[in-house]
Image: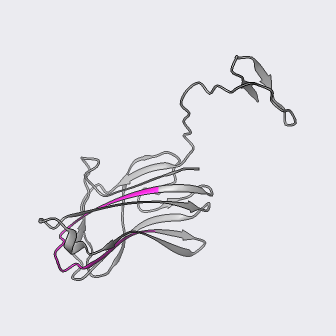
Amino acid sequence: MTVNNSIDSKQNLGSNSTPSFTGLNLGGPYSNSGQPAFYAYSDSVINNVTGDGTDYTVIFNTEFFDQANNYDGNTTFTAGQTAIYHFDVCIKLGQLTALYTSGFVSLIVTSGGTNQVLRLFDGNPGVIRDISGNLVLIGSVTTRLVANDTVTVQLTISGSTKDIDLSGSAINIGNQSSFSGFLIC
């Protein structure tokens, strides 16, 4: 291995050597293309996903990017290593009325067969919907994952029939439900 010090002289490092240099100049911003980072979204409306208490695992079927191939292109992120990760979720819903009085958006972390629920939204969606029956729920969480833990997004709305729609769009990024995340450290 060769390391350049701040005055551009080179030192060869062996397995038992100790470098002696006054500073290390990386030459600008550092990018690690092997570090997990992804953004996935729903590219079309998915009709009748919940409303009657059904737990729906949200489908984000289009990847805008998936830097280390940790997202399966449909529903699941898999941790490649034990580390601290950050996730953001945006859920856009349609067809809400005042009858839908209970709702949850959760990250489901599965580790060795055990599920951990990280709640992003817990409230009354029928009260906070807009006049057209639409609602946008946004949440984020930072958590520690163990290598091979999986993370999915689950939506549950209760109070009436199963006719709540998940909004998506293939044309306008930012105008659909999305799931993203990255390794922090």
- Front position in the image: 94 or 9: 9
Residue at image x 48%, y 55%?
86
Q: Is residue 34 above or below residue 112?
A: above
Q: Position of residue 108 (x, y in %)?
A: 47, 69
Q: Which portion, as a residue range, is magenta?
A: 87-107
Color theme of the render: one colour
Residue 95 colored in magenta in the image = yes
Image-based side of 106 in relation to 42, left or right: right
Q: Where is residue 140 in the image (x, y as percent from the top left)?
A: 41, 59
Location of the N terminus by quadrant is: top right
Residue 63 colored in magenta in the image = no
Using the rendered view, name the quadrant where residue 179 is placed. Answer: bottom left
Q: Where is residue 4 in the image (x, y as percent from the top left)?
A: 71, 23
Dominant secondary-structure state across the stretch colored magenta: strand
Q: In this view, does 10 lie above or below 96?
A: above
Residue at image x 62%, y 27%?
26
Please identify the residue farthest to the front as the structure is shown.
22
Q: Position of residue 15 (x, y in %)?
A: 84, 36
